[in-house]
Amino acid sequence: MERSKPVGICIDDGKRQVVNVITWEQRKFSDYYKMSSGCAFKMSDYCEDGIGLINGESIQHGIINDDNLNHLPESFIEQYPDFILKEGDIVVGLNRPITNGNLKIARIPSKYNDSLLYQRAGKVVYKEECDRDFSYVLLSQEILKHTLVEAVGSDQPFISTSKLDKWQMMIPKDIEEQHKIGEYFSNLDNLITLHQRKCNWLKKLKEYMLKNIFQRYK
């Protein structure tokens, strides 16, 4: 099923520009992607330092939270090649996939290149050529919509990968169009991160000044 769908985005000078007047097509998730689940590693194999083990709890919206990250021996890289994660891989928390209204989805940062994927978490595998940045934006929206409709269980909902395979979504056929959209949102994310860092610095500066100025008059 195909539809013509124009998409407008803002460019740097503030004007709106139509970047897509070509045909998008309705396809199933499984036409382009596969959700590959992690491995049930044993707690007895955990070690103090080694390969990072990415689980569903460490996957948050847009980030990998490593506050309570477990590790496995370096030798596990050779033993479990099917569960290796590379920088830029898209990972999803399959168990309790939504927190505070946001989907537990992130991309693997460079510090966790060659980490391993634990059970109840999934890695997106590409079956067709498609832009990586665009895929992250698309799947952040589509998997969230799927989860809200199809998530199994009320107390501990989880994403059924077999149901996800059948999920219908709109996607542009042209790879260059995917690239333009993915690049646009990637630039937005970078800008947000930059301003967030500046905001955090200003908050620390305010706390420091409040403490040091008013403390003098106690």
Image: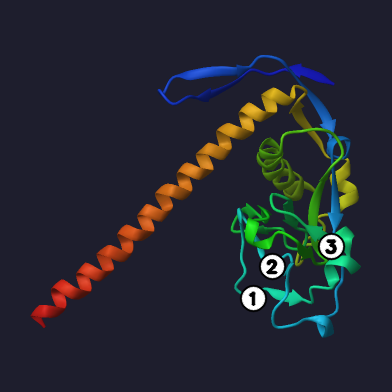
Q: Position of residue 119 (x, y in %)?
A: 83, 66
Q: Which quadrant of the view contains residue 39?
A: bottom right
Asked whether, in this view, residue 38 is left or right of residue 63, the answer is right
Query: Which SS class for mark 2?
Result: loop
Task: Tell me the amino acid under the disc marked 2.
Answer: Glu
**Real-space Cα distance between discs 3 and 2?**
13 Å
Which residue type carries mark 1? Asn
Q: Amino acid at mark 3?
A: Gly
Q: Are marks 2 and 1 in contact (CB under 8 Å)?
A: yes
Q: Which residue is mark 2?
A: 57
What residue do we see at 63% from left, 61% from top? 111
Figure quadrant of the C terminus: bottom left
Q: CA distance from mark 2 to mark 1?
A: 9 Å
Q: Which residue is mark 3?
A: 38
Between 215 and 186, the residue placed more toward the observer is 186
* Mark 1 crowd level (few <14, some 14–19, many ≥20, 10 Å Cα): few
Viewer-closest of 46 and 5: 46
Task: Residue 100: give x, y in percent of width and height.
Answer: 59, 58
Give above or below for 30 relative to 75: above
Crowding near the residue tagged with mark 3, few <14, some 14–19, many ≥20 C-alpha atoms within 10 Å: many
Q: CA distance from mark 1 to mark 3?
A: 18 Å
Nearer to us of marks 3 and 2 is 3
Q: Outermost residue, bottom direction?
A: 44
Relative to 53, residue 151 above or below: above
Mark 2 neighbour class, 10 Å CA radius: few under 14, some 14 to 19, many 20 or more: many
